[in-house]
Amino acid sequence: MNVNFKKAWAISKINFRHLKAAYIITVCLMLTGVANLILIMTGLNVTSGIVDPGNYAYGAAIFAPIFIPAINFKKIMHLNGKKTDFFWGCLFNYIIIAAVVSFTDILVYIVTKNTCSSYGYVINLVQAFGWIAHGIVPAFFQQFFFILLFEIFIHTLTAMQNFWFGWVTDVALVAIISVFTPIPVLRSALVWFFYMIIFNPTVMIQIISCIVLSAFLFALYYLFILKEQRI
């Protein structure tokens, strides 16, 4: 695979410029979270728990990998972009977004924990998933690689919707959840999978699991989906 990182970075910047909707949605979600905190602190809203505003930064990691393959791909191809450059450009996008979201979430968590804990329980994923128990730096990387996996999964699934097997995959995912959940043995396998990529108490195992799955999904996207994708 010949990689022109200069062109890939140029495509990455184009992607960022065409993600205004994702930015607006994410900012609105975070402002909603901040508003809820203010209401609780002023006594206008009484509740035992509230989602940390930092968690709403995940909106960028949800919507960016939807808009990029669904909308930006055609725009870039019409600008004579190459699929290989688009592939690496997307990877740059997702790495940067994962880093920013992880940093933002942890920073907001630290602030809310020190200022709002006396007003109610503030729920943050770094705490709910047990990442912060290992310290701020390991928590950042655990969250970073999980978000990266999450982005690549959404990107690949979105790109697959252009093909018949995308719809089959959608049905299969629903079937897996529906069938695996009520059956103890299969449910245990599903729990083990999520335990491995999210809750594993061994930091390196959790991180490596996310890296391996991310590489597999993006290789699938490049070798099979992107090669067949038409504009």
Image (cartoon, grey):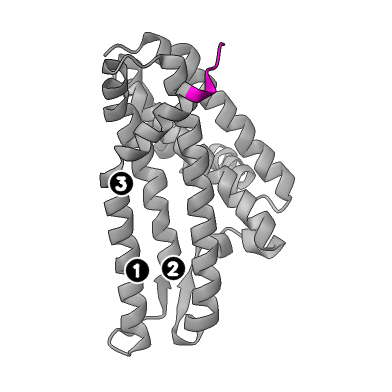
Per the image, label 2 sits on a secondary structure element best described as loop
Position in image of residue 144 (x %, y %)? 57, 47
For the point 57% across and 65% down, the residue is: 127
Q: Residues within 10 Å of mark 1 (few under 14, many from 20)?
A: some
Look at the picture and state if 72 lies above or below 106: above
Count how many numbered circles sit on residues in the image. Answer: 3
Magenta span of residues: 1-6
Identify the mark at residue 5; answer none if there is no mark: none
Q: Residues within 10 Å of mark 2 (few under 14, many from 20)?
A: many
Q: Identify the residue under disc 3.
A: 22
Report the predominant secondary structure element of the magenta stretch: loop
On the rendered structure, is 30 left or right of 99?
A: left
For the residues labelled 2 and 3, the Cα–Cα distance comes to 19 Å
Name the foreground residue: 201 vs 53.
Answer: 53
Name the foreground residue: 155 vs 167.
Answer: 155
Q: Earlier in the sequence, mark 2 or mark 3?
A: 3
Q: Identify the residue under disc 1.
A: 33
For the point 50% across and 65% down, the residue is: 124
For the residues labelled 3 and 1, the Cα–Cα distance comes to 17 Å
Query: Residue 219 lies in what quarter of the image?
Result: top right
Q: Identify the residue under disc 2.
A: 52
Q: Residues within 10 Å of mark 3 (few under 14, many from 20)?
A: many
Q: Earlier in the sequence, mark 2 or mark 1?
A: 1
Per the image, label 3 sits on a secondary structure element best described as helix
For the point 45% across and 19% down, the residue is: 85
The three-letter amino acid code for the residue at tag 1 is Gly
The three-letter amino acid code for the residue at tag 2 is Asp
Q: Is residue 228 visible?
A: yes
Look at the picture and state if 224 lies above or below 138: above
Work out which residue is located at the far bottom of the displayed protein and give it.
43
On the rendered structure, is 131 left or right of 27?
A: right
